[in-house]
Image (cartoon, rainbow, N blue to C red):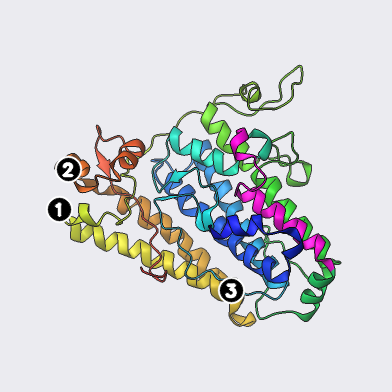
Amino acid sequence: MSVVVEQISTDPARRDVAWLHQSLQSAIALEHSTLPLYLSAMFSLEVQNYPTYNAIRSVVMEEMVHMAIAANMLAAIGGSPRIKDLDPGYPCVGLPGGAEPDLHIGLAQLSRRQIQNFMRLEAPLFLLPDKYRKEGYPTIGRLYTAIKEAIVANAPAVRKSFAAGGPANQVGDNIGFTTITAAGGDPVDQLDQAIDEILVQGEGSTSGTIQAGPEYENEESHYGKFAELWYGTRYQEPNPPVTLSRKTEPEFFKGSRVTWPVVVNTLAVPSDGYARVLARDPNGVAVTRDLEAFDAVYTRIMAELDTMWNGPAETLWPTFGEAVKDMTDLRVLSCFNILRYHVPAPIVAELPRLYPDEYPFLSEYTDLDKPVFYGPRFRNQAAPGA
C-alpha cells in the first residue's frame, strides 16, 4: 500500500500529530510534483507571453505558494520540511506516495492530452467520475481533507505542538506565502484557513463552483484555468443559470476565444532522461551539457528551498533571492538552449526499438511525424539514486 493511501485510510482516531507531520510532508511532495509537469508545458510555448503562457504561469506561481504553505504548516507544529531530495521520478503512474494512481503522466509539451491530465489533477470532487469519488481513493484534495479533519480532531495537541515550536522557519513574502504565527491567533484556525486557501485556488471555492471566490479576486481556480485551455474559450456563467456538473460543464465555457499557442514539439522525457537518445546523437555532448546545466540549477533551487525552512533564520531572505534568480535561469536554460536542439530524425525512427515499453507514452505526447526537439528533464541530482 502506498504512503498517501495509508495516510488517507488511517482510522481518524489514529491520526495524531505524528500522522500530521507525515501527511504534510506528503502534501509538500505532491505540490512540488506538479511543478515540473506544468513548467515543461509552459516552457514548450514558442512565445513566452499571451493568454496560455500567462494562465499556466499563474498556476505554477500558486503551486509554489501552496508548497510553501504546506511547509509552513509542517514547521508550525514542530516538523522540518524535507525539500532538497524531492523527485517525482517522471514518467510514472500516479504521483508521489501513490496519489492519483489512475494517471500515467510525465514531462511533455503542452497538448490537449496533457491538459486533460492537468484538469484531472486539479478536479474538484464533484466533477470526478464516480470511481474516483470513493472515500479511500487517494486524490490530492482527499489528503488535504484528511489533514484538515485531523487538525480539528487533535486541536489541543496541535496547539501544544505550536506553542513548543520547532527547528524550522516560517517563510512568508508578498506573493501569498501564508504563515502560521502567534500574532495570527488560534493556530488551529490558521491551519484550517491555510488548507482552505490551497483547495479553493486549486479546485474552486465550493462544491458547486470552480471559481476561487471574492477573497481571491474571483479568479479562476487551477481547474478553471486549464479548462479554458481545453475548451478554447473563457469561463462564463450560463444565463439562465444551471448547476455545474460533469454533464453541464461545457455550458460554462462559452466566453471569448482562447487561441491555441504555437508549441515546440519536444520529445516527452523517457525514464532514462534521454540517455539512449543522447548516446546516438552526433550532437549529444552539447545537448548533455545543457541538460546537466539545467538539472544543476534545478537541484540548487531545491537545496535553497530546503535551507529557507531549515537553515539559519538570518539567511532566509538572501537564500530566497538566490532561489528566485535560479528560477529565472531555468527558463533561459530551457527555452533558449535545450529546446533549440533537434532530435535527429533517424533517432526518432529508432524510438520503438530504443524504448519498447515507453514508446506508447512517447508517441502519445510527441508528434513523431514532425521535427522533434529535446525538452527539460528536471532531474534532481541530490535525489536518492540520482
Side of 28 where 94 appears, left or right:
left
Q: Which numbered disc, 2 or 1, marks the residue closer to the eye?
A: 2
Of the two numbered discs 1 and 3 on the same chain, state the one appearing first in sequence: 1
User: Callout 2: few (<14), some (14-19), or many (20+) C-alpha neighbours within 10 Å?
Assistant: few
Side of 115 where 225 appears, left or right:
right
Q: Report whether residue 194 is seen.
A: no
**Does 44 appear above or below 1?**
above
In magenta, the rendered stretch is 129-155
- Return the residue at label 3: 308
Marks 1 and 3 in Cβ contact (< 8 Å): no
- Tell me the CA gap for discs 1 and 3: 41 Å
Side of 113 where 293 appears, left or right:
left
**Does 161 appear above or below 127?**
below
Marker disc for residue 350: 2
Q: Secondary structure at mark 1?
A: loop
Q: Image point 29% across, 57% down: which residue?
A: 272
Q: Image point 74% across, 18% down: which residue?
A: 239
In the rendered structure, which amino acid carries the disc numbered 2?
Glu
Side of 232 where 108 appears, left or right:
left
Say which quarter of the image contains residue 293. Answer: bottom left
Q: Image point 56% across, 70% down: which residue?
A: 320
Residue 218 % position (x, y)? 73, 39
Q: Which numbered disc, 3 or 2, marks the residue closer to the eye?
A: 2
Q: Residue furthest top?
A: 240
- Return the residue at label 1: 280
Q: Image point 39% across, 51% down: which residue?
A: 91
Q: Which numbered disc, 1 or 3, marks the residue closer to the eye?
A: 1
Q: Secondary structure at mark 2?
A: helix
Q: Report whether residue 177 is seen.
A: yes
